[in-house]
Amino acid sequence: MSIKLFKNNWRKYYKRGFLTGIIVLCFLCFIDQTLQSSIFFNKIHNLEIFFFTLSFILFGSVFCGIISLVILGIMSIITISKE
């Protein structure tokens, strides 16, 4: 078990997961808005739907960051410290 791995890299893994989530969800939203009928998001017609979509993207990105922290935790449990 390598606690040092988690302690030294948790910020980097969270940022990487969060930014990846933002990029992927924004790309999906952009593609979804250009389609005739939307699949993942509602069509943005007014400000209320726009803010709802932005909050969905933000919370989805936070969730992606938390998932990357869970994966880092599993990796730190599995790896063996060289000390």
Image: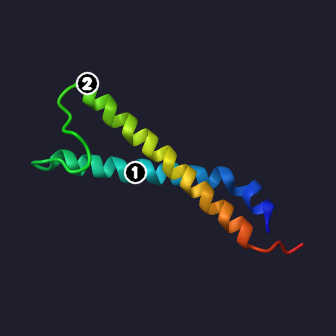
At mark 2, the secondary structure is helix
Q: Residue at x 54, y 50 (%)?
A: 65
Residue at 79% of width from left, 68% of height from top? 1
Of tags 2 and 1, the one toward the viewer is 2
Measured as percent of width and height from the top left, residue 66 is found at 57, 50
In the image, 4: left or right of 35? right
Q: Position of residue 46 (x, y in %)?
A: 20, 26
Residue linked to disc 2? 47
**Which residue type carries mark 1?**
Ile
Residue 20, relative to residue 79: is it above or below? Answer: above
Residue nearer the viewer, 9 or 1: 1
- Left or right, 29 with respect to 35, comes to right
In whole angstroms, how far apart are the C-alphas of marks 2 and 1?
22 Å
Please tell me which of labels 2 and 1 falls first in the chain. 1
Q: Residues within 10 Å of mark 2 (few under 14, many from 20)?
A: few
Residue at 72 percent across and 65 percent down: it is 76
Left or right of 73? Residue 48 is left
Q: Indicate the secondary structure of the residue bearing disc 1.
A: helix
Q: Amino acid at mark 2?
A: Leu
Query: Is the Cβ of the residue at disc 2 closer than 8 Å to that at disc 1?
Result: no
Judged from this view, the residue extending furthest toward the right is 83
Image mark for residue 13: none
Residue neighbourhood size for the residue with mark 1, other residues' Cα within 10 Å, grouped as few (<14), some (14–19), many (≥20): some
Residue found at the very far left of the displayed protein: 36
Q: Which residue is label 1 attached to? A: 23
Question: In the picture provided, is 56 more to the left or to the right than 30?
Answer: right
Residue 21 in picture, x, y percent from top left: 44, 51
Q: Please report the residue visible at 46 percent of the width from the left and 54 percent of the height from the top.
A: 20
Kindly indicate the quadrant of the structure image that contains residue 49.
top left
